[in-house]
Image: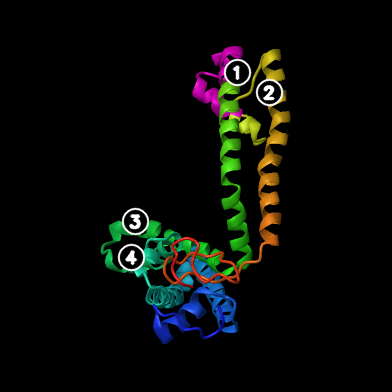
Amino acid sequence: MPPHKIHPDLGPLRSRMHEIIFEADTRAGKLFDLFLAAAILLSVGVVMLDSINSIHTRFNSLLVAAEWFFTCLFTVEYLLRLYSVARPMQYATSFYGIVDLIAVLPTYLTALVPGFHFFLVIRVLRLVRIFRIFKLANYLQEAQLLKQALNASRRKITVFLFMVLTLVLVLGSAMYAIETPQSGFTSIPRSIYWAIVTLTTVGYGDISPQSPLGQIVASLVMIIGYSIIAVPTGIVTAEIAIAMKKEITTQVCPHCSAEGHDPDAEFCKYCGGRL
């Protein structure tokens, strides 16, 4: 999308705001993304510092002021995003729209919840503000590339996970038959838990086979685990290589907020709206 292009459904001001806020092909769009990314990191840092008792006690007023500053900043950003799209409700109910709302809502809720006995609830609401870190993915082109690769490989990974699930069910059932309850294999679900821990090479050690046959099976599961870990990595890597060859832009549909359009695209590939 060339700079300053006026979208017929938005008008001059909203078109310009949409270009700056949602896209990164222009200098203004890149600067906006850099500013938002820095603000997100700083706001998350404020939340993390506030969880340290010594810092919270000493700099409580400063941290509260900083939190309200970032909350107001992200609130304005959220409202501008709704204003600069043709279908505000569609963006509000999208993944990033919900994340944007979650990033600001807890601060307002903590101000409305009265009483010291609600302190634990307030602490939980304050932790939800960490969701702001997910907003970073919306400002990085590399994140869009990774998202496309994961989306393209989802069917292969789903089939792979189904095979892994089948494998742990078989292995867990086999170990339940081989081992005794004294070894920790008291039920098939617990044996399946052991199979998952062993297959993923985590190895907590809370359950371990004691019989020679069980140890042989465990050894095979460990060896299989190394090969299984490499499969999803190879699938995603192959899709990333394919995605890198495709030239895409940061152009965002003003109707449905979809991304990943071709440079010469005039209409959205998802909703059919004019770009």
Mark in front: 1 vs 4:
1
Q: Is residue 182 magenta?
A: yes
Closer to us: mark 2 or mark 3? 2
Q: Which residue is mark 3?
A: 121
Q: Which residue is mark 4?
A: 110
> Which residue position is annotated with label 1?
175
Q: Write down the residue under mark 2.
A: 218
3D distance between C-alphas at marks 4 and 3: 9 Å
Q: Earlier in the sequence, mark 1 or mark 4?
A: 4
Q: CA distance from mark 2 to mark 3?
A: 44 Å
Q: Is residue 145 in the magenta section? A: no
**In the image, what residue occupies the spot 29% across and 57% down?**
117
Q: Residue 92: x percent and y percent?
A: 37, 65
Left or right for 9, reference 169: left
The range drawn in magenta is 173-195
Q: Secondary structure at mark 4?
A: helix
